[in-house]
Image (cartoon, rainbow, N blue to C red):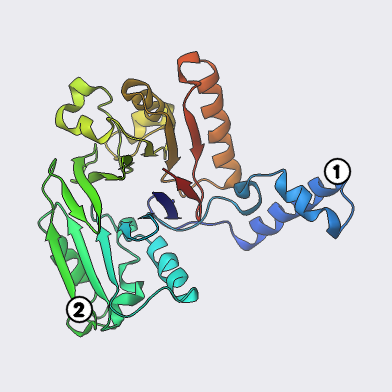
């Protein structure tokens, strides 16, 4: 499986302002010359010495994840990243007649559904769209996004046939060839993470998760989200010393993510749902703090970890 991250911001879309990008690229150009590079022939060498996020930042779009293999795919959440996914399908002519799209929704906070009206297959009669959700109000919420005066095309006029499927917590459902099991996360409004498995590999989607519960005993049935997984995507919007003020907001920290990995012997974790108030420098500071936290705890050093950026693909 490959996990493509089309949107990794939390709460609402955010990117640098025009002047902030100018300052960012000015700093990169200065670094180019400070390192002794001289001209266009050195550009690729310079870029190869930096992470993609060093150059282009971490992205602006809110949560949308694509789980795919060579033959099939699932979409998790319809944040503004869903518009980017839709644009990608159109640009690469990957929307073909008779295609079906499978969208899993974790919950209905606006940053996770704002991209739904801009998913172009809704407007094509040769496409079929399936929504999957644990919560009873899924159809009502999706329909409400397509109504005047908020959106010019009402739900009744969408060209694509749309089907809503109800998932049951802790029960396995086969969706487009993937095994999907929902588990409840620690979030003020009901929110469900998903464990997605195929060909002996498992991906655990656990953003919008304060992770108040980090042991199997505390999690009970929800421990299944973290057991025997090959890749965990975990909410790390805040840092631990912010949690007194932001307790109950439904977002986690890298400290809690690492403790979950330790408790459940998870070897690989990516951290996201980045705080929209953080610019590139702010997220880099978070990464540095996470590195220091790991270095102080030798038992965590075997964990592969990174802060995810928009457009990144991670192999499971």
Residue 212 relative to residue 314: left or right: left
- Residue 137: percent from left, percent from top: 12, 59
In this view of the protein, can residue 51 be seen by the observer? yes
Residue 256 relative to residue 289: left or right: left
Residue 156 relative to residue 296: left or right: left
Closer to us: 75 or 259:
75
Residue wearing tag 1: 34
Circles 1 and 2 in contact, beta carbons < 8 Å: no
- Residue 185: percent from left, percent from top: 23, 39
Q: How far apart are marks 1 and 2 (CA)?
A: 56 Å
**Residue 294: mark:** none
Residue at (19, 44) in percent of width and height: 182
The image quadrant of residue 108 is: bottom left
Split into 4 quadrants, where in the image is the C terminus? Answer: top left
Residue at (72, 50) in percent of width and height: 47
How dense is the environment of label 2, judged by Cα within 10 Å: few (below 14), some, or many (20 and up)?
A: some
How dense is the environment of label 1, judged by Cα within 10 Å: few (below 14), some, or many (20 and up)?
A: few
Residue at (24, 40) in percent of width and height: 187
Residue 57 relative to residue 31: left or right: left
User: Relative to residue 250, is residue 102 depicted above or below?
Assistant: below
- Residue 63: percent from left, percent from top: 38, 54
User: Relative to residue 44, is residue 295 depicted above or below?
Assistant: above
The image quadrant of residue 247 is: top left
The image quadrant of residue 246 is: top left
What element does badge 2 sit on? helix
What element does badge 1 sit on? helix
- Residue 232: percent from left, percent from top: 37, 37
Residue wearing tag 2: 155
In this view of the protein, can residue 7 be seen by the observer? no
User: Relative to residue 224, is residue 281 depicted above or below?
Assistant: below
User: Which of the two labelled residues, at mark 1 and mark 2, occupies the earlier sequence position?
Assistant: 1
């Amino acid at each position: 499986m490959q996990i493509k991250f089309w949107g990794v911001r939390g709460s609402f879309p955010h990117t640098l302002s025009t002047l902030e990008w100018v300052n960012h690229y000015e700093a990169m150009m200065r670094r180019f010359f400070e390192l002794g590079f001289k001209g266009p022939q050195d550009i690729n060498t310079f870029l190869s010495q930096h992470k993609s996020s060093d150059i282009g930042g971490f992205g602006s779009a809110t949560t949308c994840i694509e789980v795919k293999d060579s033959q099939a795919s699932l979409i998790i959440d319809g944040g503004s990243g869903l518009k980017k996914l839709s644009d990608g399908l159109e640009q690469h002519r990957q929307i073909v007649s008779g295609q079906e799209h499978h969208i899993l929704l974790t919950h209905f906070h606006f940053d996770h559904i704002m991209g739904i009206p801009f998913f172009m297959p809704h407007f094509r009669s040769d496409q079929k769209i399936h929504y999957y959700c644990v919560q009873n109000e899924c159809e009502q919420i999706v329909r409400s996004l397509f109504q005047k005066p908020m959106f010019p095309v009402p739900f009744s006029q969408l060209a694509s046939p749309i089907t809503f499927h109800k998932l049951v917590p802790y029960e396995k459902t086969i969706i487009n060839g993937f095994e999907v099991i929902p588990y409840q996360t620690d979030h003020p409004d009901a929110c469900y993470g998903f464990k997605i498995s195929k060909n002996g590999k498992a991906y655990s989607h656990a953003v919008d998760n304060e992770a108040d519960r980090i042991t199997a005993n505390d999690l009970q049935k929800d421990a299944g989200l973290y057991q025997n997984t090959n890749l965990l995507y975990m909410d790390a919007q805040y840092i631990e010393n912010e949690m007194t003020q932001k307790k109950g907001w439904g977002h986690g920290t890298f400290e809690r993510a690492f403790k979950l990995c330790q408790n459940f012997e998870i070897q690989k974790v990516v951290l996201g749902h980045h705080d929209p108030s953080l610019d590139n420098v702010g997220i880099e500071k978070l990464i540095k703090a996470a590195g220091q936290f790991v270095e102080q705890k030798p038992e965590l050093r075997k964990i592969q970890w990174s802060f995810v950026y928009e457009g990144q693909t991670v192999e499971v």
